[in-house]
Image (cartoon, rainbow, N blue to C red):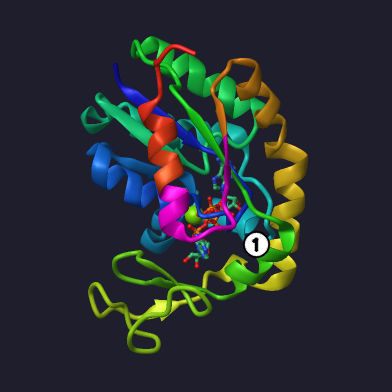
Amino acid sequence: MANVVVMLGPPGSGKGTQAKRLVDVLGIPHVSSGDLFRHHLSEGTELGRMAQKYMERGELVPDAVTVEMVIDRLRQPDCEEGVVLDGFPRTLTQAEALDEALREQGMAVSVVPLIHVSDEEVIRRITARRVCKDCGAVYNLAFERPEEEGVCDVCGGELYQREDDDQETVRHRLYTYYRETSPLIGYYFAQGLLVEIDGERPMADVQRDLREAVAQVGEPG
Ligand code: AP5
Ligand code: MG
């Protein structure tokens, strides 16, 4: 049975960090809608330019284009064995579109880990985040510093701060999360798919709970 993991949680809760570690053990792709939009932006596509207007304000890109972009990605052959979704779905409309697309492929969401982190911690983490321009590796000036300032440990690329990572935009992203994405908690809870994880612990502890949640999929009781 294909594993379809939906990482849920506020901005900065560690969805990306944890998803990257999880796919290393599961051997399935990590699909991040935010990364897909940022890729379009760096390639200068029309979709990228359109998405940028929403991203820089901390608002959601409209459902229709987001759903099309992510579902196209899910139809690629490397997703047949499963996928770890990060940042998608983010609205009930997106969640229903995902269910339908998976059904057509004979798949279904298997587990929804929800990473809890307080608003204060989100702001602390995000304003200290740095990302590699070349390979996308993620650092944190407070918790996970690169060995050499401004340089990626993995590939030597230049580290930068995401445009939407200033304090004001982060506050708006949090507001958007509570307003538009938090209803998904009830949606997945009702289906028995939600697993709540305390995200305010060392990354390795969060990862251990996440792997446990994924391993228990399909086990009785
Ligand atoms: P997206 O890129 O998805 O951003 P986000 O949801 O706001 O989440 P982040 O990437 O900021 O945080 P994360 O949870 O991945 O945390 P990370 O692991 O990096 O979306 C960006 C924008 O794109 C949206 O605002 C929207 O405009 C658009 N968009 C995307 N998807 C969309 C959709 N489906 N529909 C419509 N629009 C969409 O960790 C954060 C930092 O904390 C890092 O520095 C990390 O090193 C550190 N850290 C992680 N874990 C720990 C820990 N346990 N302890 C200490 N530090 C930690
Ligand atoms: Mg992320």
Q: Does residue 177 appear left or right of residue 115 in this picture?
A: right
Image-quadrant location for residue 184: top right
Query: Which residue is at a point 40% across and 25% down the rendered structure image?
Result: 216
Most foreground residue, 94 or 144: 144
Most foreground residue, 168 or 210: 210
Q: Is residue 118 visible?
A: yes
Query: Which residue is at a point 45% across and 58% down the rendered structure image?
Result: 203
Picture coordinates of residue 135, whole percent (x, y): 29, 66
Q: Which residue is mark 1?
A: 122
Q: Residue 154 lies in magenta, yes or no? A: no
Image-quadrant location for residue 91: top right
Picture coordinates of residue 153, whole percent (x, y): 28, 77
Q: Is residue 32 visible?
A: no
**Of the residues shown, which amino acid type is indicated by label 1?**
Val
- Mark 1 within 8 Å of ligand 1, using the beta carbon: no
Instruction: Count up the numbered dots.
Output: 1
Q: SS for tag 1?
A: helix
Q: Does residue 90 appear left or right of residue 218 in this picture?
A: right
| In the image, residue 137 above or below residue 152 | above
Picture coordinates of residue 5, whole percent (x, y): 42, 32
Q: Quadrant of ligand 1?
A: bottom right
Q: Does residue 32 appear left or right of residue 73 in this picture?
A: right
Most foreground residue, 145 or 219: 219
Query: Which residue is at a point 40% across and 78% down the rendered structure image?
Result: 159
Tell me which segment is drawn in magenta. 196-207
> Can you name the residue that lies furthest to the front here?
221
Picture coordinates of residue 124, whole percent (x, y): 65, 71
